[in-house]
Image (cartoon, rainbow, N blue to C red):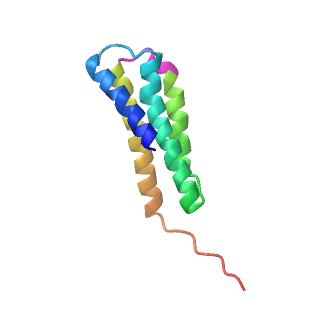
């Protein structure tokens, strides 16, 4: 998770220098790869702690991968916003999942 945050921060810093320029492969990898790396780390943590992999994280990683080919046609700032929206959507998905009543524990005799 920490590596994802650091990588994303590096991508954001580079975009701040030239926000309107289309990102190259390196900047795209930093921005979208950092978000995906964070989500993978968070999913691994949930798997270790709660013995489940959140579907929202899997979808978030898939969306960051799907955005990569489109990133070449967008300004760097738009790619940053897209990565942020993916992370926001995952957070909202997790909040909604947490608010659902949990299934009752199975009865053992």
Q: How many labels, in total? A: 0
Compared with 37, 31 (above or below) is above
* Residue extent of the magenta highlight: 69-75
Q: Residue drawn at (40%, 49%), measured in percent from left and top?
A: 92
Residue placed furthest toward the bottom: 109
Choose between 34 and 92: the one closer to the eye: 34
From the top left corner, tell me how far across and down residue 73 is, in percent.
Answer: 43, 14
Compared with 30, 85 (above or below) is below
Q: Residue drawn at (39%, 36%), measured in percent from left and top?
A: 6
From the top left corner, tell me how far across and down residue 90 is, in percent.
Answer: 45, 45
Q: Residue drawn at (28%, 16%), measured in percent from left and top?
A: 18
Is residue 50 part of the magenta span, yes or no? Answer: no
Is residue 72 part of the magenta span, yes or no? Answer: yes
Compared with 24, 36 (above or below) is below
Residue placed furthest toward the right: 109
Residue 30, located in which quarter of the rendered image?
top left
Relative placement, left or right, of 61 versus 106 is left
Residue 27, located in which quarter of the rendered image?
top left
Relative placement, left or right, of 10 versus 29 is left
From the top left corner, tell me how far across and down residue 109 is, in percent.
Answer: 72, 86
Choose between 105 and 5: the one closer to the eye: 5
From the top left corner, tell me how far across and down residue 101 is, in percent.
Answer: 49, 68
Compared with 86, 109 (above or below) is below
């Amino acid at each position: 998770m920490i590596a994802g945050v650091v990588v994303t921060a590096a991508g954001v810093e580079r975009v701040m220098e030239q926000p309107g320029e289309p990102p190259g492969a390196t900047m795209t990898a930093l921005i979208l790869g950092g978000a995906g790396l964070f989500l993978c780390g968070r999913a691994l943590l949930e798997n270790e702690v709660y013995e489940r992999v959140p579907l929202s994280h899997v979808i978030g990683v898939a969306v960051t991968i799907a955005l990569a080919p489109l990133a070449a046609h967008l300004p760097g700032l738009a790619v940053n916003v897209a990565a942020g929206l993916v992370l926001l959507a995952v957070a909202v998905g997790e909040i909604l999942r947490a608010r659902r009543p949990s299934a009752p524990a199975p009865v053992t005799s």
